[in-house]
Image: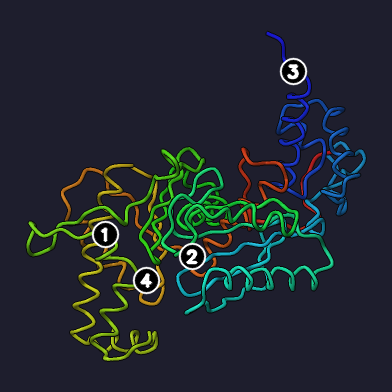
Amino acid sequence: MIINKHIMRTTNEKQVLQQIVNSGPISRSQISRNLSLNKVTVSDIYSQLLHEGLIREVGHGVSTRNGGRKPVMALLNVGYGYVISINILRSRFSMITCRLDGKSENYESVSTRDVDLTTVLDMIDDRISATMSANENRLLGIAFGLDGVIYDNQILAASLKGFKNFDLAKYFSDKFQVPVVLENLASESAIYERDFAGEGLYHNLISVTIRDQVAAGIVTDDRLYRGHNGEAGNIGTCPLADRYHEENMETVNHYVAEGPVLQRIMAYQKIDRVDVNRIRRDYLGHRPELLSILDEFAYYLAKVLGNISNTFAPDAIIVNAPILELLPELMDKVRDYVGQMAILRKAPLLLTKNAKEASLLGGASAIIHKALGLDDLQLTFGNQRSAVLEGVES
């Protein structure tokens, strides 16, 4: 068999950079041992990355017990550039800037209520331009997340008017001359759970997001699964039998999506805007009207989660829902309903640790992978260590 030397070199370069991102500060000799590559190859790639400014040296580790020179330690150079991640929802968009080590900055949420698509794009354009003007480092890429079916960086279906088949990636890539990646919100949340929150614990997980739609992001063997044309996880349109009259069927979105649930709450409260403080107050005060609405929500959500657990057998299911972030105690009722189901597989049901930014950070991870040329390799964020370590061999 003839091995293409260029492919070997590219693979080695990616793996060395992956080691520095995931395990830095780290020495060349430790990278060599971790990858079973000879030291000359590692040193050559290391020097190239250092010359390009992708990594930086941060001090020395500790020499071996036998003495010798202390090894120079390297980290990813977060000053090399930054990325922007944007989520577009029905009546707002949210945005963060993110360093290459996954640290987020400058979260903002902008209302787009009663605004058309062209104006929304202009508003996003203005925010990106303002961020670039205020940042001395260079923009390396942009990620967009939205509810819908996305495949091969194209929007095949969307809950937002005007976005279906609109080439959002090309529009902003042409404007800012950087790579742009698109994902649906559920897939971004699943990436977040894998790369930021999971710490390598769950290799097969499902993140269920409840926003304008109910959707599932699926990670199998650490890889995002999109299915045919990106349609995997589109559970919001699946039918559910009515709790009291099984012959009546509605969609999962009807019973569980954020909009319909909040509409029911506002209707009983006789107000036309969501008042989260009042929802929390009524819940703690055991208002029967609210408890009834939330019991219905918990029951139908349990049906969805139980079926997912039994069908996919994931290591864990992580739920990302603002209503559950506001009322985390409600998750116990969901677990109780799942516990009553006659199913073989009951995966752990968890709440995300960061409902507000989970999908944004998942998008940031996706574009960081792209910017670093590491699309097919696992990166883990959020566990950066001190610059000088103890017990590192030379």
Judge the density around disc 2: few (<14), some (14-19), many (≥20) Cα neighbours within 10 Å.
Answer: some
Give SS at disc 4: helix
Tag 1 or tag 3, which sits nearer the N-term?
3
Q: In the rendered image, which residue does mark 3 sit on?
A: 4
Q: Distance between the residues labelled 3 and 1?
A: 50 Å
Q: In the rendered image, which residue does mark 2 sit on?
A: 353
Q: How far apart are marks 2 and 4 (CA)?
A: 11 Å
Question: What amino acid type is highlighted by mark number 1?
Answer: Val
Q: In the rendered image, which residue does mark 1 sit on?
A: 252
Q: Distance between the residues labelled 1 and 2?
A: 24 Å
Question: What amino acid type is highlighted by mark number 4?
Answer: Leu
Residue 319 sits in which quadrant? bottom left
Tag 3 or tag 4, which sits nearer the N-term?
3
Q: Residue at x 41, y 50 (%)?
A: 206
Residue 347 percent coordinates (x, y): 32, 49
Question: What amino acid type is highlighted by mark number 3?
Answer: Asn
Tell me the mark number nearer the camera, choosing from 2 and 4.
4
Tell me the mark number nearer the camera, choosing from 1 and 2.
1
Tag 3 or tag 2, which sits nearer the N-term?
3
Q: Distance between the residues labelled 4 and 3?
A: 52 Å
Tell me the mark number nearer the camera, choosing from 4 and 3.
3
Tag 4 or tag 1, which sits nearer the N-term?
1
Tag 4 or tag 2, which sits nearer the N-term?
4
Q: How far apart are marks 1 and 4 (CA)?
A: 17 Å
Q: In the rendered image, which residue does mark 4 sit on?
A: 324
Tag 2 or tag 1, which sits nearer the N-term?
1
Residue 114 percent coordinates (x, y): 47, 79
Q: Residue at x 42, y 54 (%)?
A: 207
Q: In this view, does 19 lie above or below 12?
A: below
Give SS at disc 3: loop
